[in-house]
Image (cartoon, rainbow, N blue to C red):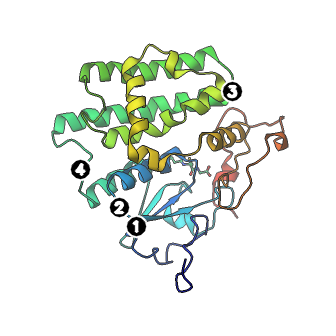
Amino acid sequence: MTSKEQPVPSSDELRTPDAPLLPGQVCRIYSMRMCPYAQRARLIAAAKGISHDIVNIDLNNKPDWFFDLNPYGEVPVVLHKGGHVYESLIAAEYLEEAFPEPKLFSEDPMVKAYERIYYNHWTKKGIPAFYSLLKAGYPDPEQTKRLIDHISALEEYMVKLNKPYFHGETPGFSDYMIWPWFERMPMLMDITEFNLSALSCPCIIAWVDHMWKNPVVQHCKIEPELLTQHYALYRKGRPDFTIGADGKAAPSQAAVPEALENLDGLREAHTRDRQK
Ligand SMILES: N[C@@H](CCC(=O)N[C@@H](CS)C(=O)NCC(=O)O)C(=O)O
């Protein structure tokens, strides 16, 4: 850096919605490093080459203004042209429409409809099964079967499609909507012993291999050990949303209390909602 250049603000600096975008950027994504939903928006932005700045929110310490951007208090939120869009699928669709090139959806309405059917299926059924198994925290047979059933539904579709990606010959919108949870499968294996590669889902396993080679996926990937640290705390009801933040040391697992009440689920309302 020469003496005239300004240091680039960190993505952990809590820039408010009225703070100007960083130089050369066209939109902002309010994110949290470990969040798979925010990763959907980051993947679409990267695939389209949309220059964006990222502001990571510590979800344990949400500023009041964050609820003006999203009344649910969740990331991602995309800020663009003075407006803001939340809910990951809607935010990703917004980016697809506002930045039309390259197109990530198929132009054929029937193919597009099927892409949507499968990432919606994953969102409605696969993701809850993923978290149920994660929260069970051991090779729970019922939750394991549930997750396998939903991965098998994706496999059946891929067999019929007979293409390397949900989108077809190249990765597209649907691939990026489903991918973040498959990036977390090694973490799920660390915590629950769920082994994706042992399933009889050759098309999905090949898809995962292809996706790992994709430069967009590589650009947006999260260090696997940070994911394991994050989700180990998360399933114990003590998420630390600043893991991986600039200048922050990795948390010590030994510091996490074992006896916690909130094992089976969602964060308690008072930790999610507007802080009084
Ligand atoms: N349905 C939402 C879910 C987003 C979501 O759950 N994000 C989590 C982080 S991964 C969040 O912001 N949680 C708020 C909290 O825990 O307080 C979407 O698709 O955007």
> Can you give x and y, in whole percent of width and height, for residue 274 in the image?
63, 60
Identify the residue under disc 1: 27
- The residue labelled by disc 4 is 103
Q: Nearer the viewer, mark 2 or mark 3?
A: 2
In the picture, measured across the screen, residue 135 lies left or right of residue 159, that is right
Q: Nearer the viewer, residue 67 or 143?
A: 143
Q: Verify CB contact (< 8 Å) between mark 2 and mark 4.
A: no
Q: Position of residue 159 (x, y in %)?
A: 29, 19
Asked if labels 1 and 2 touch by Cβ distance under 8 angstroms, the answer is: yes
Q: Earlier in the sequence, mark 2 or mark 4?
A: 2
Amino acid type shown at disc 3 = Gly
Q: Earlier in the sequence, mark 3 or mark 1?
A: 1
79 sits left or right of 97 in the view? right
Q: CA distance from mark 2 to mark 1?
A: 8 Å
Asked if disc 4 and disc 3 are in contact, CB closer than 8 Å, the reply is: no
SS category of the residue bearing label 3? loop
Type of the residue with mark 1? Cys
Query: Within 10 Å of the Cα at label 1, are there few (<14), some (14-19), or many (20+) other Cα atoms?
Result: many
**For the residue carrying disc 3, how many other residues have a C-alpha within 10 Å: few (<14), some (14-19), or many (20+)?**
many
| Alpha carbons under labels 1 and 4: distance apart | 18 Å
Task: Quadrant for the N terminus, please.
Answer: bottom right
Residue drawn at x 66%, y 49% as measured from the top left: 269
Q: Which mark is residue 137?
A: 3
Name the residue carrying label 2.
Answer: 50
Amino acid type, label 4? Lys
SS class of the residue under badge 4? loop
User: Label 2 crowding class (10 Å Cα cut-off): few <14, some 14-19, many 20+?
Assistant: some
